[in-house]
Amino acid sequence: MTALIRLSMTVPGMVRFKLRQRSLFRPLAALALLLLADVVAIPGFFQLQLKEGHLYGSVIDIVNRAAPLILVSLGMTLVVAARGIDISVGAVVAISGSVAALLTGGSAAPQLPLMVALSVALGVALLCGLWNGLLITVLGLQPIVATLILMVSGRGLAQLLTDGQIVTIYYEPYFYLGSGYLFGLPVALYVAIGAALITALLLRRTALGMFLRVLGSNPVAARMAGVNTAALLVIVYAFCSACAGVAGLIVSSSVKSADANNAGLLLELDAILAVTLGGTSLAGGQFNLAGSVVGALIIQTLTYTIYSLGVPPELNMLLKAVVVFAVCLAQSTQFRQRLGFWKED
Amino acid sequence: MRNMPMMASLTTAALLVLLLAAGASAYPGFASIQVGCNLLIDNAYLLVIAVGMSFVILSGGIDLSVGAVLALTTVLAAWMLQNLHWPAALVITIVLVLGSAFGAGMGALIHYFKLQAFIVTLAGMFFARGLCYLISANSIVIDDAFFTSVSQFQIPLFGAFVSPGALIALIVFAAGIWISRCTPFGRAVYAIGGSEQSAEMMGLPVARTRVAIYALNGFCSSLAGVLFSFYMLSGYGQHAQGTELDAIAAVVIGGTLLTGGSGYVAGAFSGVMVLGVIQTLIAFQGTLSSWWTRIVIGGLLFSFCLVQRMLVAGVGGASKKR
């Protein structure tokens, strides 16, 4: 037993799966069902081809497009675990994309080095998160109202920066983030998985995970126990916006432009969906990072399946809704009791 | 004993008066009754939605599907009027019943299977919008005689005029206040919002009340859809995008806490009016490009919440439960 625990300390990524097997089971089962439907309905779904050193295939497409959603879901998981919500992530995606596009000049030879431009964009995203956190902790606004303010004005700010135009990016190295490949797999995937692993490490190897759970379960008790709840909340919201900032960089890099109006539209809803599908409760107090990643993959696979099956795009929303209902019902113990299926675990 | 919800609602009313005064002093045409009536006419649908949303939020829940149900109502009504040529009264009755049934369905899912309201109503929103696009991807123009005559009808009021929609909205608002204050249902709503467990132990019919709350909200959303189709004379799946957040903002600005159990339905009126006045001020300013409009609305929302918090905190001093 102790050997297993010691092993778990050294291999956090893998053992998260082992220890959380039961809570991850349902999201994984839903994803597996979707993939099964894909294999049956779409010929050559799991086919992978190696061309010019890149891996091509439906699965690669899905994970590439899911990368921004995975990143935003990571941040959203922590915010939801702290009993909050952040609906401004879509606006932050637009803002960070616009800032990066502007700083890389709109010409083939920008004035600033790439790293500086990326850092500034990330810094702006962090500032947005700090703003949210301060509104909630210092002013005591409710999270949905505080983030609503940024959601409404954020897009306006992004449009102000780009003067209402779509800024095209011509600087080649910038495309590496969204469209580049490393050892055959998309760079965006590495960024998303890397962020997930770093977050998981931080939450398990430091006291942050425990503090976050305590904060979400009972904020007053947490404060009285000596946890700096205000600082923790600010950190969590800043982290969420930073994740959205990275997602914004990936999005603008893959479309090679910054569209302040449409970048990240409705992304917050997809992120909250992914988080809940993954098993994190909106009531706060616990979080399931791996589940959120799986939830994001479920949503992206669903979108891809709908388009590949030739289902008219009008049915996209309808099918998404049905799948969400089905997964939520499957996760509800009351529903399972009524069906007489699995016993409550 | 300091009454926190009362202070918040009064603060909003006071700030609304301030906004109106600022507008009247800055723009000569602002201080006219017609401007006030236009506020009512343009935001009639939002007022009806905000009344329904107040009940949901007072009970501790949330409903993100209101805009989608509104759009679905307009599309259904337009489709039935234009393609089936059914009489307007029948069409209106059908959509109201369907809206209530949709709401009741979501309420049942939320209560009996203990699902989270945010997710169920979010999925409901996708479902309703999906249905809209399934029925018709394009906008359907309504040219039914009843609808066009209602849309153009003007009710005189103090030298200006209001639309029948605004009058209906005011009636719904008054009814909402009466239901929340003078009926056992209203008391049950507050009790559930305060503590669902205590409400159950007290013997209140929590299941029935919860389903009824969401059914009432569905009814208000579809009624708002009917008002909206009077206003726009068309059914379109993209109507009322973002209305759910407007409604939540209006309810919260009006002093209702999102955690439930605290606030007044009457606050929804001042919340809707504040949002409407902000839009009117921007329109009167006239020179702001569309993105400045968003920034200004966000900024005004922020200052509003800031002043409200400062006033309430200065008077009450109680720490809010998060």
Image (cartoon, coloured by chain):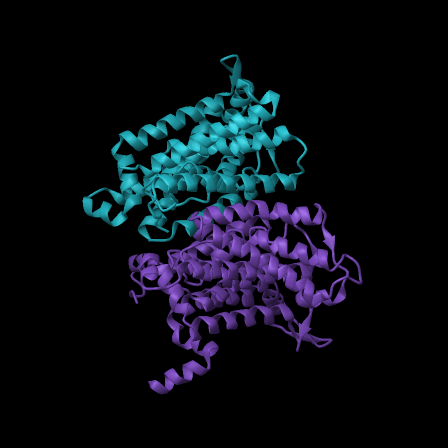
Chain colours: A purple, B cyan
Q: Residue at x 72, y 47 (%)?
A: A165
Task: Give percent across and percent down for residue A271.
Answer: 51, 57
The answer to whether residue B69 is visible is no
Q: Residue at x 40, y 45 (%)?
A: B62
Q: Residue at x 49, y 66 (%)?
A: A294
Q: Out of A204 and A113, give the one closest to the viewer.
A: A113
* Above or below, B130 relative to A209: above
- Residue A303 is left or right of residue B182, and the answer is right
The answer to whether residue B4 is visible is yes
The N terminus of chain B: image quadrant: top left
- Residue A190 is left or right of residue A144, and the answer is right
Say which quarter of the image contains residue A282: bottom left
Residue lying farthest front?
B314
Residue lying farthest left?
B202
How many numbered badges does the structure rendering display?
0
Task: Give percent across and percent down for residue A216.
Answer: 37, 59
Residue lying farthest top?
B159
* Above or below, A299 relative to A8: above
Task: Give percent across and percent down for residue B212.
Answer: 33, 39
Q: Out of B127 and B178, give the one closest to the viewer.
A: B178
Task: Give percent across and percent down for residue A183.
Answer: 66, 78
Q: Out of B245 and B211, give the one closest to the viewer.
A: B245
